[in-house]
Image (tube, rainbow, N blue to C red):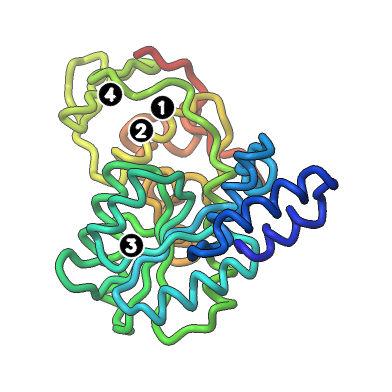
Amino acid sequence: MENVCLREALNNLNVAEVCHLNSIIVATCRGVFTCDNLIHLFCRKVGINWHSKYMESSNHILVVDDHRDIRDSLSKYLAQHEYRTSVAADAVEARQVIDQRAIDLVVLDIMMPGEDGLSLCRHIRQTTELPVILLTAIAEDTERVIGLEMGADDYLTKPFNPRELLARIKSVLRRTHSLPPRSTPTESDKIKFDKWIFDVAQREVIGEDNVAIPLSTAEYHLLNAFLDHPKMVLSRDQLLDITSRRSAKVFDRAIDNQVSRLRKKLEDDPKSPTLIKTVWGGGYMLTVEVER
């Protein structure tokens, strides 16, 4: 990626800028510097905002793997396809990169020394909205399901074709970027909608008769999604991403089943719902106002 961007920058230089670049090269000829160093030195000298001019349009991928040849080869491959990349050898390095840089997606190996990928995935999900694609050498459904339950967006078994990883990255980023923004932050412990009060802390809804109805984990996350996006049509893929960050193709009809169960608890007539409506060809929509 650095070489591609450097070529792009060089092709657009005027005479004065070429002179500035030459002075930088002469001044640093006795040292070792990377393309990235050269680019930033040059941009500072001529007053160009490098990030906004050349890098803003590309997504930044963090590759976390304890095998150097794997992370370096993946980083190089992704860079060739116009992604910015950072690498980390373990969870400690990965946390530092996430804290210090604007990452758009994490490609994460499960089997690592020290803190494993599943634990790091759980941390990422609890503290950020970053999508995660897990990598593992173990082709077992149990580990795949555990990874998805930890909040991963997709899962790939080693060895794999880099083109497949690239396709999955594009798919996850496309779904993630299509998510609508929240209407307001979820700060209140109790949220009122229609005739119900949603007690966030207790994970239950309270009706007009003051009877509390407990919600399952899936129902809790689904209702949270609807309350964060009232009067907005949410597709199944969007609901899957918002509620559980799981791969839509793995849990194809899960949202339909969860909506059906939630309707049975909230609707006067679940067979003719008015609170959570089906939008044919679109998805689902909460039809009422929300008070926080």
56 to 76, vertically: above or below:
above
Q: Which of marks 4 and 1 is nearer the N terminus?
A: 4
Q: Which of marks 2 and 3 is nearer the N terminus?
A: 3
- Residue, far right: 15
Q: Badge 3 is on which residue?
A: 148
Mark 1 neighbour class, 10 Å CA radius: few under 14, some 14 to 19, many 20 or more: many
CA distance for labels 2 and 3: 19 Å
The local secondary structure at tag 3 comes to helix
Q: Do the residues labelled 4 and 1 touch (CB within 8 Å)?
A: yes
**Hey, what amino acid is under mark 1?**
Leu
CA distance for labels 2 and 1: 5 Å
Q: Badge 2 is on which residue?
A: 224
Q: In this view of the protein, which residue sits in the foreground, 221 or 104? A: 104
Nearest to the eye among marks 1 and 3: give it: 3
Q: Do the residues labelled 3 and 4 touch (CB within 8 Å)?
A: no
Q: Are marks 2 and 1 in contact (CB under 8 Å)?
A: yes
Tell me the tag on residue 198.
4
Residue at 50% x, 69% y: name it. Answer: 75
Residue at 15% x, 68% y: name it. Answer: 114
Q: Earlier in the sequence, mark 4 or mark 2?
A: 4
